[in-house]
Amino acid sequence: MNLPAGCEPRCPGCTHRMLDAATSEAQKMDWLRRALAPWVDRLQSVRAVAGADRWGYRGKVCLSAVWNAADGWNFGLWRRDELIPIPDCPVHTGLVRTMVRWLREALPPGATFPLAFYVQSGAQATLILKTPHVSNLDWLDGERRAELASMGLEGLWLHLHPAAGRRLFARNGWTLLWGQPRSRDAFGLEYGPTAFQQLIPALYREALDAAETFLAPEPGDSLADLYCGIGASLARWTRRGARTLGVDLGGEAVACAGLNAPAATVLRGKCADRIPQLRAWTPFTGTRLLYLNPPRTGLDPAVLAWMTDEYRPERLAYLSCSAGTLSRNLRELTEAGYTVERLIPHDFFPQTHHVETLALLSRG
């Protein structure tokens, strides 16, 4: 397979980049058949984009930054103890590649600017420095600001976080260096620099369409949306007139969800910690529905117990980024009386081994 220009062979990021689309999708389906074996007869084919759309799709990135006197700034991913620079990664969007090239030229030396990570989410970018204070901001002059505007970036943030590492973001230490604090995504929804966004809007829309058709919320129904993010799913449920409640851990996500789905009730915190509020919100009458989009670790045992023992939704849709944890949760749900109706894989991460699956279940 001929790789696009800029693809670094040593980069650990895209394990399927040497495979064509058909081979990559076949490997993903083989993994899903094994991981979800008890329900393989309900497993549908992978929904995927084709051709050029399999490249240049990644608009949310986190790159490590390293300075040295010989080459200046490099941005990339670590492989063991070596940073592999990926300044022109063909999986990244054009704006990400343009920003990386711009930063290499614009940023001051590392001795005065201890940059550790560069994070970009759509049109919002963040420079994460491992220091409690920095004085060298003269580099962002009027000419540089004009360049940012011409490239299509909408917000550039400085985040001072001395302990940045596995946890990239802290509550304090934020400064908007230039631009506006929020942008709008392909769905017209507001988002900020830390909010999660699903990649490949066309596929995400298809997944939400399938969930909405299956759940079929109506006025008088109650729909709990756990791990709701910025509210892409919440906005759908409220448009259909359902009584809706969302929960998410991220403060920025909750703020954006409130703007994107103003008719919904949105709570901040871990879903397991919000069970008392979920319990109080649960109606005594009407159809109960549930939508889930948890992290890779799957459902917290306390959340699963609340779902199966107390809330007991008639129908639920579960978008999972890990077939292994999805299999575990599906076993627990089927033991509690739920039937797996359909499993629909979505290839949100072309060129990688990752695949996400929408599970649709009904009670009884």
Image (cartoon, grey):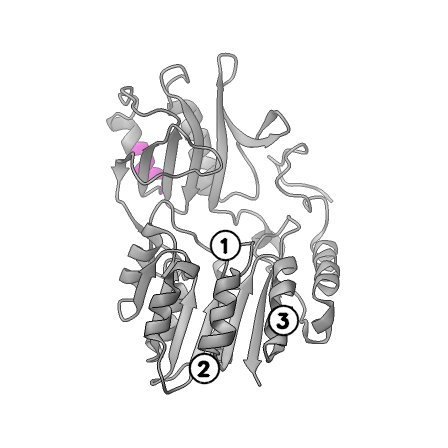
Residue numbers of the magenta segment: 146-152
- Give the spatial CA distance, label 1 vs label 3: 20 Å
Secondary structure, mark 3, is strand
Q: Residue furthest top?
A: 69
Indicate yes or no whether the magenta region holds residue 94.
no
Indicate yes or no whether the magenta region holds residue 149.
yes
- Give the spatial CA distance, label 2 vs label 1: 24 Å
Q: Is residue 263 above or below residue 160?
A: below
Q: Position of residue 102 (x, y in %)?
A: 41, 29
**What label sits on residue 276 in the rendered view?**
none
**Most common secondary structure along the magenta stretch:** helix
- Give the spatial CA distance, label 2 vs label 3: 17 Å
Answer few, some or many: residues within 10 Å of disc 2's Cα (few below 14, many 20 plus, some between 14 and 19). Answer: some
Quarter of the figure with the C terminus: bottom right
Task: Please give the name of the residue rendered at 29% of the width and 23% of the height, measured from the top-left corner.
Answer: 133
Residue contact between numbered discs 2 and 3, judged by CB atoms under 8 Å: no
Q: Position of residue 223 (x, y in %)?
A: 40, 75
Name which residue type carries label 2: Ala
Q: For mark 1, what is the residue? A: 199
Residue 336 occupies quadrant: bottom right
**What label sits on residue 343 in the rendered view?**
3
Name which residue type carries label 3: Leu
Query: Counting residues from the N terminus, which is met first, the one under dot 1 or under dot 3?
Result: 1
Q: Position of residue 216 (x, y in %)?
A: 45, 82
Name which residue type carries label 1: Leu
**What label sits on residue 216 in the rendered view?**
2
- Number of labels in the image equals 3
Secondary structure, mark 2, is loop
